[in-house]
Amino acid sequence: MYLDRKTDMIMSGGRHPIKANYTVGLKNDGKITALHVDLFIDAGFTVDFSPIFPYTINKTMMKYNWGAYSVDYKVCKTNLPSKSAMRGPGDTQGSFFAETIIEHVASILGLDSIVVREKNIHTLESAKLFYGSSVESPVSYTLPSIWEKLKQSASFYERTKNIREFNATNRWFKRGLSLVPCFYAVRLSSRPARVTIFEDGSIAVEVGGVELGQGIWTKVKQMTAYALGQLWPGLSADIMAKVRLFQSDSISLAHGGLTSGSTTSEESCEAVRHACDILVERLQPVQILLKKSNPNGFSWMDLIFQISEGKHQRTRVEQQDKGDIERTSTVPVIQAKSQSVDLSAQTYWVPDSSASQYLNYGAGASEVEIDLLSGATTILRTDIIYDCGRSLNPAVDLGQIEGAFVQGVGFFMTEEHHVDNNGKLVSDGTWTYKVPTIDTIPRKFNVEILNSPFHQKRILSSKASGEPPLLLAASVHCAIREAIRAARKELPTDNNKHFRMDTPASMDVIKSLCALNNVELYLKSLCISTKQ
């Protein structure tokens, strides 16, 4: 089914609107001792993916050590269009709620938000308490080192000082800087794959995952060359050019599973590796015989040609009194003829239950500048450090991190879902639904991939990179809040009072929170200022 963009947007439903009420217990130094949250999730008029949201929201909200923690969820059926899953479903909203609570506590106590974050960021012990077996060894818990490294590389405290000086000398432009952590729990699932070697040496690969631009096929192609390259050193480079990937369907490769959760690439790679291991096991006996007859070496094509020749060199069979006699050509293919080599292997990989879940860590710092008169926001700089484990493809993962972050900026800043009084979607195109553009991208964008230590039970020690970095875009929303707070300090009636800022933090929202959306309010503030 092919739809035009407007129809597609009307049918898609969008992300779930969620209302959160929370009660926080805290100490004067910013340490949170208890948190209770009531969440009301607008599912629309059908179930769709809504039942997973309590799980996904909760696993992201636990990014801080809340002490005594409880959540009450209600998935609400409404008379509005059904909502559906979108990149980081529930995780994005959960991250926003967590950061909002931290910002609220900081505002009430008059502390910098980074002080409150560091007071409540997980230690290894508290992370194990909240996330259980998903937390691996102490060496694998890289968040504390990422946090400290980013503070230094982003010159956080020096820039904070510079921003305060800028805000003190600029009436109509304000800046803000915020640094947030990322906790993202993923769960591996089963995945099928088929690898077939043809007589011309080419290799066809089918996997259950769908290529959506996230680089599944690139990583699978590399894994195929790597796994078949076990036959002898230096073979991987020759094989790489011979690999072709085909999009499977439910007949050619049943039980393909969902392409979701940021783990499809590594699951597909592992399934392919197992299929290649089967082929390597079948090819090794023929390889050993070839080494004896070709001491000077042989190529991939020699190996496959030897097998294919063994299958087709049988000529004619003549009937004689004493039985059948098979005549063969003079090509030395005795070893291939003596055994039937199946050059197609299919596997269904099932993850080890003891290693089916793990945590992704990262941190992001963003600096923004807001125009108080128009509400326009410019992201001046963003610094990200993200733990990819042993990246399967650093170039692909780097693109995933940058792309996820920018998409997250759309959620936190520009993408607003409007409906009319009848529930019909109004923002049904890019004229009314503002997706991130080239102007939304940070002017200076620094991303570092942290290669964490070897891990025996993860797939080649790699980690997911598709959805977790999206949550780091919360740093932009928090930085906007800091800039607005600086603007409101100049309003005698507001001072440091806490204010609510939902998503997205669009231009009109920012302008309104700076109290400059109304000339009368602005003139009134000037009068109060003059009298004082």
Image (spheres, grey):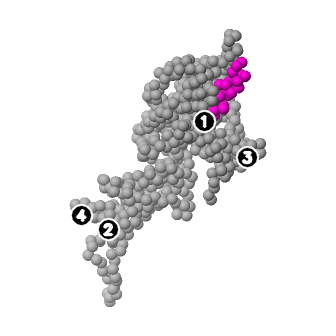
Please tell me whether residue 174 is drawn above or below residue 426 in the rendered image. above
* Rendering quarter of residue 59: top right
Pair 1/3: label in front: 3
Q: Which label number is shown at residue 306?
A: 2
What residue sits right under mark 3 in the picture? Answer: 424
Label 1: which secondary element: helix
Mark 3 vs mark 4, CA separation in Å: 73 Å
Mark 1 vs mark 3, CA separation in Å: 23 Å
Going by the numbered disc 2, the residue's amino acid type is Gln
- Assess whether mark 1 and mark 2 are in contact (beta carbons under 8 angstroms): no
What residue sits right under mark 4 in the picture? Answer: 294
Q: Going from the N terminus, do you reach mark 2 or mark 1 first?
A: 2
Please tell me whether residue 518 is drawn above or below residue 258 in the rendered image. above
Image position of 121 (left or right of 8): left
Residue drawn at (52%, 63%) of the image: 252
Highlighted magenta segment, given as a residue range: 506-524
Magenta segment, principal secondary structure? helix
